[in-house]
Amino acid sequence: MSKRDYYDILDVSRDTSKEEIKSKYRKLALTHHPDRNKSPGAEEKFKEITEAYAVLSDDQKRSQYDQFGHEGIGNRYSSDDLYQNVDFNDIFQNMGSGFDSIFSKFFGGRQSYSEEVGQDLSTSITLTLEQAASGVSTEIKIPRTEICNECKGSGSQPGSKTKTCNTCQGRGEVHLSRSMGFTRIITTQTCHTCQGKGVYIEKPCKKCKSSGVMRNVKKINLSIPSGVDDGFTLRLKGEGDIAQRSKRYGDLYVTLRIKPHKQFIRDGDNIHFNTNISFTQAALGSEIAIPTLDGAAWLKIPSGTQNRTVLRLKGKGMPRIQSKHKGDELVTVNVIVPKKLNEKQKKLLQELAKDFD
């Protein structure tokens, strides 16, 4: 089947402006994107309108299409070349993750420079169990690559000018073509003249050596919610390294480590504590002070409590993240039997023993 006319696909006339074409494409793409439209043929329709937009949004490709039709496009551009200058992030910004990787997901090509994201970073911090229970705000320092504060990312000395690279015409890449028999192979490489920047810098920035980025230590105020457990990881969007060409930041992942506690053992939302009581406290009953994560609390020991009995302090455990629920403190009581008795104590126990015989 012959290909449909690109103008018909986007439902625009031949004198429609680039901005109108962009607006029309965005509306159609939102309608037919397979993540939103589950009807049969949505993905093929999406690819069709995206190919039409890739051609009609580029002045050179549009001119060639106007003169020679599909023959002027298919014989000149590989699929990689066809989407070379399309900035999908600009079109679909703030539309969610289903759109920001649109190029690589549906067209199998590499990411454009505008889609490149800096490297993600990771670090870890250690908390006490009390800090994990209450939540805490702290400052962390992260070495990372970020925009040069001297040239603001341009790579050019402030006040100097840049020129569009003549080798790659501002694309940052060059396409090399070679023939093998009846096959023509096109490869894409970073432009050696501008090193992928797309511009020629007359006076490189002295601070970043024209890279536009530099190493720095970023101070970040970190708010840790109450109830976190060992191994819990926080994602800080945009706090990773910066990509040199796209100037987009990666993310920072902070893993939390909880120190072992001297008194408590954590078990999910609950904590365990061991305490000793005397033989008489176990037999007669008592009330004793027990340490908790937020201060001392009174624990009632029922009369006749047996050794290794577990008693519960309700709501004295760990909070659950993003919830009003709190676990319990489970107290195991160890009944201590005296190893030595004086004569008076022995007689009293002997009299007591008669009552139980």
Image: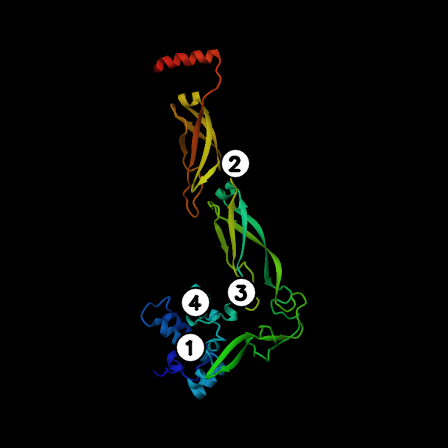
Pointer 1 local density, CA inside 10 Å: few below 14, some 14–19, many at least 20: some
Instruction: Check disc 3 and report the residue beneath it.
Output: 248
Q: Is residue 152 left or right of residue 112?
A: right
Residue displayed at 64% across by 71% down: 156
Asked if marks 4 and 1 touch (Cβ < 8 Å), the reply is no
Question: Which of the marked residues, 3 or 4, is nearer the chain's N terminus?
Answer: 4
Q: Which structural element holds mark 3?
A: loop
Question: Which of the marked residues, 3 or 1, is nearer the chain's N terminus?
Answer: 1
> Residue 170, image x and y in percent?
56, 77
Q: Which structural element holds mark 1?
A: helix
Above or below 280: residue 85: below
Residue type, numbered disc 2: Lys
Is residue 68 in sight in this rendering? yes
Question: Which of the marked residues, 2 or 3, is nearer the chain's N terminus?
Answer: 3
- State the CA–CA distance, disc 2 to disc 3: 45 Å
- State the CA–CA distance, disc 3 to disc 4: 16 Å
Q: Which structural element holds mark 4?
A: helix
Label at residue 262:
2
Above or below 221: residue 41: below
Is residue 96 in sight in this rendering? no
Q: Which structural element holds mark 2?
A: loop
Residue type, numbered disc 1: Glu
Question: Which of the marked residues, 4 or 1, is nearer the chain's N terminus?
Answer: 1
> Residue 317, image x and y in percent?
44, 39
> Residue 28, image x and y in percent?
38, 73
Residue type, numbered disc 4: Phe
Quadrant in the picture for the C terminus: top left
Q: Is residue 5 left or right of residue 82?
A: left
Instruction: Check disc 1 and report the residue beneath it.
Output: 51
Instruction: Check disc 4 and report the residue beneath it.
Output: 99
Residue displayed at 48% across by 77% down: 81
Q: Is residue 46 left or right of residue 265?
A: left
